Structures are given as C-alpha cells and as structure tokens.
Image (cartoon, helix red, strand yellow):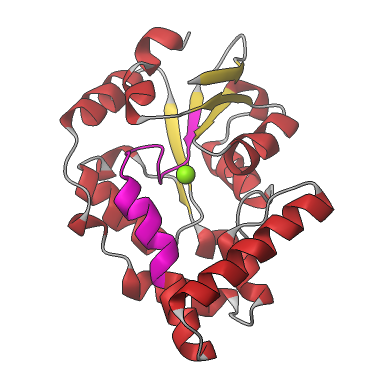
Amino acid sequence: MKIYRLPPVSSALVFDMDSTLYTNPEYERDQIDLLIKRLARIRNKTFEDMKGEVASYRETWAQVRGEKISLSRAFMDFGVPLEENIRWREELYEPSRYLKADPVLGKTLDSLSSRYSFALVTNNPESVAKKTLAALGVGDFFSILVGLDTCMVSKPHRLPFLKALELLEIPARECIALGDRYEFDLVPPLELGMGGILIEKIEDVYRLEEILP
Ligand SMILES: [Mg+2]
C-alpha cells in the first residue's frame, strides 16, 4: 500500500476492480492473453508474435508520450474498435472460473459502508464487472459502476472518474481513489483533486478500516 493523498474529510471511495478487489495473477494474465489470442487469430499471426507486437507498441507509446496506454486503446490502434473489444471481453471473460467469494472483503466493505459511499471504475465492461463482483460475493456494495461501455473511454482518461463523481454526487476533494495501477487508477483522480491510495495486494484493502479517517 502506498498512500499518495488522504483528504481531511472524505465520504466516498472510488475503487478499481481487477487486481484491486482481488489478487489473482493467473486471471490477470489470462485477461490480456485471451484478447491477444483472438487478435492473433484474426491477423493470422502466432500468439507469441502478436503478444510481442502489442507489448512493444505499448512500451514505445509510454516512452514517446510519457504516459501509459490502456490495452483497449492499444487494440484500437491494431484495428479493433472499442465496441468489438467490449464484445470480446464479454464473450471471453469468465471471472467465476478464477475467483471465489471473499468473506473478508465483504466484511471490510460492510464496515466501511457505514462511513463511505462506494463507486467502481473499471476498464472492463459493466457486465464483466457485475460477474466479477458477484463471484467475489460483493455485488450488493456497488450500485455505482462505471465500466468501459459507460463512457466508451478507458482509464487513464478522466471521463470515467468524472462520471463516478457525478453519480456519487460528492465533490472530488471528498473522494479517495483506490487501485493497483498508479498511472491508470490514481493519476487522473489525483489531478481532479481526489485522494489516492495504491493497492498492492488484497490485504491492503482488508487494512483500509485502520488506515482511513
Ligand atoms: Mg486494476
């Protein structure tokens, strides 16, 4: 866990989902590989070649522009429109194959919910987010959900965060963003005046009760 900023008064938590509300390296890897496999098939390339091409494209982008590019945004540059990317994710991702109910997470969110409103901002489509939260047994805690298909842009774009703030009806200065990727989950919220905490493993989420004001 790394705390970047904690507001003096806060009443909402804006969570990233993948690798924030669970830790599962296999699912993290497969989410990328499943999309690459399908792209490779369409492009008549081997999986390894396609994976290398996408990875080096993203690396070059980061070097040249000084910021990271989301996988969905990179896929657009490889000729896969966002609508298609969303469809692929909906078809290919089955979170319940990797994740199971997490009672400690449930207990943590339950306790935090007496002091905070929650929103979820994810670069996965809303339907995948709902399946993921259901697999973790915490679906009831997130009535505010901003996915890839909500604003049709992915983090690190600011728009999904602005949408979450609008739905929360809470000013940015009273919100704290939590996520595992600094550039995607924390840079835009910090720029908007929100607080930010980097989550490095699920145990960091379990500790929020003692960390948060
Ligand atoms: Mg994440």
Residue at 69% across / 29% down in the picture?
A: 190
Q: Position of residue 210 (x, y in %)?
A: 38, 8
Left or right of 174 in this view: 213: left
Q: Is residue 56 above or below residue 37?
A: above
> Which residue is most to the right?
64
Quadrant of the image occupied by residue 27: bottom left
Give yes or no for residue 188 being in the magenta stretch. Answer: no
Looking at the picture, how far across and down is residue 9, in whole percent? 58, 12
| x 74%, y 33%: residue | 191
**Above/below status of 52 relative to 11:** below
Q: Which residue is drawn at the image coordinates 31% and 37% (left, top)?
A: 141
Q: Residue at x 48, y 82 (%)?
A: 40
* 117, above or below 162, in the image: above
Q: Magenta stretch?
A: 13-34
Residue 37 at x, y percent in the picture: 42, 76
Q: Is residue 71 something one can see in this rendering?
A: yes
Is 94 displayed left or right of 39 in the figure?
left
Give whichever of 174, 49 is nearer the camera. 49
| Percent position of residue 112, x then y | 35, 20
